[in-house]
């Protein structure tokens, strides 16, 4: 659960996010969200030029059945475990900067597996620190990174993917250590 202050995304007096089905029970909302985003993940994702707009389209694709604000940058400050993510007033600029850097790196194409793991881990780590959406950042990051990896010639293997290992590596990268995330990516790249 996120730490947030005066959160207009939540129902008054609760930490449950306002949603399209008006579900007020967190367990029920979590179950519905997991099911529907899993279904959406099996559908074709939006195509186009790798850009912040495409990244937002990925989030909208996954969460369109759950939240009215799917695909839109958050407008509140949030943190996890007391660690703040990018302040909302800086999200657009930081996402633009990150994607400009990705474009300058030719979207991670023509790299060895090792270089792809290093640069891919840095991209994911930075994207996670920005955390542009109120909810659904992790799922969107993974879906988009799989798309990016495919386009870069390093498709990810789905078998053997360990969500707990990925989460732990993402958390570690937030404090500046990208090595575990590099390892996870290296293991996921098809050989």
Image (spheres, grey):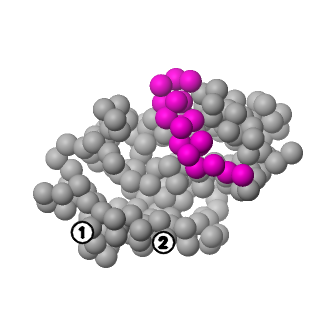
| Residue 171, image x, y percentages | 49, 35
Q: Which mark is residue 36?
A: 2
Query: Which residue is nearer to you in this view: 34 or 58?
Result: 34
**What residue is rendered at 52% in x and 30% in y?**
172
| Stretch of the chain drawn in magenta | 160-177
| Residue 160, image x, y percentages | 72, 52
Circle 1 residue: 24
**What residue is rendered at 33% in x and 48% in y?**
1
As drawn, is 32 to the left or to the right of 138?
Answer: left
**What residue is rendered at 49% in x and 55% in y?**
56
At mark 2, the secondary structure is: helix
The C terminus lies in quadrant: top right
| Residue 169, image x, y percentages | 57, 35
Q: Distance between the Cα atoms at labels 1 and 2?
A: 17 Å
Decide whether residue 176 is among the magenta residues.
Answer: yes
Decide whether residue 190 is among the magenta residues.
Answer: no
């Amino acid at each position: 659960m996120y730490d947030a202050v005066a959160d207009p995304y939540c129902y008054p007096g609760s930490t449950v996010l306002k949603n399209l089905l008006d579900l007020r029970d967190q367990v029920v909302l979590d179950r519905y969200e997991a099911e529907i985003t899993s279904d959406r993940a099996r559908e074709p994702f939006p195509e186009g030029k790798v850009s912040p707009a495409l990244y937002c389209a990925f989030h909208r694709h996954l969460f369109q059945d759950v939240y009215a604000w799917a695909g839109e940058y958050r407008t509140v400050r949030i943190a996890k475990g007391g660690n703040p993510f990018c302040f909302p007033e800086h999200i657009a600029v930081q996402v633009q900067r990150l994607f400009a850097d990705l474009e300058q790196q030719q979207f991670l194409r023509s790299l060895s597996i090792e270089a792809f793991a290093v640069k891919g881990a840095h991209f994911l780590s930075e994207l996670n620190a920005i955390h542009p959406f109120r909810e659904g950042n992790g799922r969107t990051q993974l879906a988009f990174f799989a798309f990016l990896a495919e386009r870069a010639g390093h498709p990810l293997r789905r078998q053997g993917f360990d969500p707990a290992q990925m989460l732990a590596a993402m958390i570690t990268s937030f404090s500046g250590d990208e090595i575990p995330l590099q390892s996870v990516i290296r293991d996921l790249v098809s050989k």
